[in-house]
Image: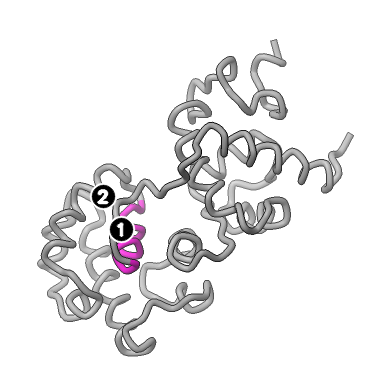
Amino acid sequence: MRESKQKKRERAAQAVELLEKKYPDAVCSLTYHKPHELMIAGRLSAQCTDARVNIVTKELFAKYRTIADFAAADAEDIAEIIKPCGLYKTKAQSVVGMCRKIMDDFGGEIPDTLEKLTTLPGIGRKTANLIMGDVFGKPAVVADTHCIRICGRLGFTTSKDPVKTETELRELLPPEKSSDFCHRLVLFGRETCKARGQCCAECELSVLCPSNLINKK
């Protein structure tokens, strides 16, 4: 029997509550102190672990402290610093480009809408949503690999496409809790609902998960 949208919303609300209990502090795994640092770290995290990004940005943010600093930077110098993140030449160009556009088109201030954020070089919807939630405190859905995998297993989403996943989750999640829920999914995905060898026997969400391996035995 096909699950109703209302029933799915109820399960989603239950999942939000259970993960709030498991992870009371919903924090971003990228280390930053200023809004533009989160924007840049988000760009560097593409096809790279957050742990590695945090190592690299320690040196990067010590050398370049403001959006204006990055806008005036030599992309080759940035590329050398961020080399361990992979795709470093492209990412370096993006970092300089996004900061120049912010200086030229937005008065040196990071824009506060998805539409404007995604006009910045190298900023896709995932990073734009991260900024919307963490910097501006607005409803946001960060459809990263953990979110896509776990919400698919939970039956909340039907696609592995990030944009479709984001759209489906926006219809289910309480808007004021959606951003923190995505942060908690990252922690949950690393510890329990892994890409391989998920730990259903130890999973707090097993009671509402149709993909629970225990129930399939």
- Element at label 1: helix
In space, the residues marked 1 and 2 are separated at their CA atoms by 7 Å
Q: Residues within 10 Å of mark 2 (few under 14, many from 20)?
A: many
Left or right of 186, for residue 200: right
Q: Per the image, is 212 magenta?
A: no
The image position of residue 21, as x and y in percent, is 57, 34
> Could you tell which of marks 1 and 2 lies nearer the N-terminus?
1
Compared to residue 20, the image places residue 194 above or below, namely above
Q: What's the residue at 53%, 50% (across, down)? A: 180
Q: Secondary structure at mark 2?
A: helix
Asked whether, in this view, residue 89 is left or right of residue 161, the answer is left
Magenta range: 35-46
Label 2 amino acid?
Val
Identified by mark 1, the residue type is Ala
Contact flag, marks 1 and 2 (Cβ < 8 Å) = yes
Pointer 1 residue: 41
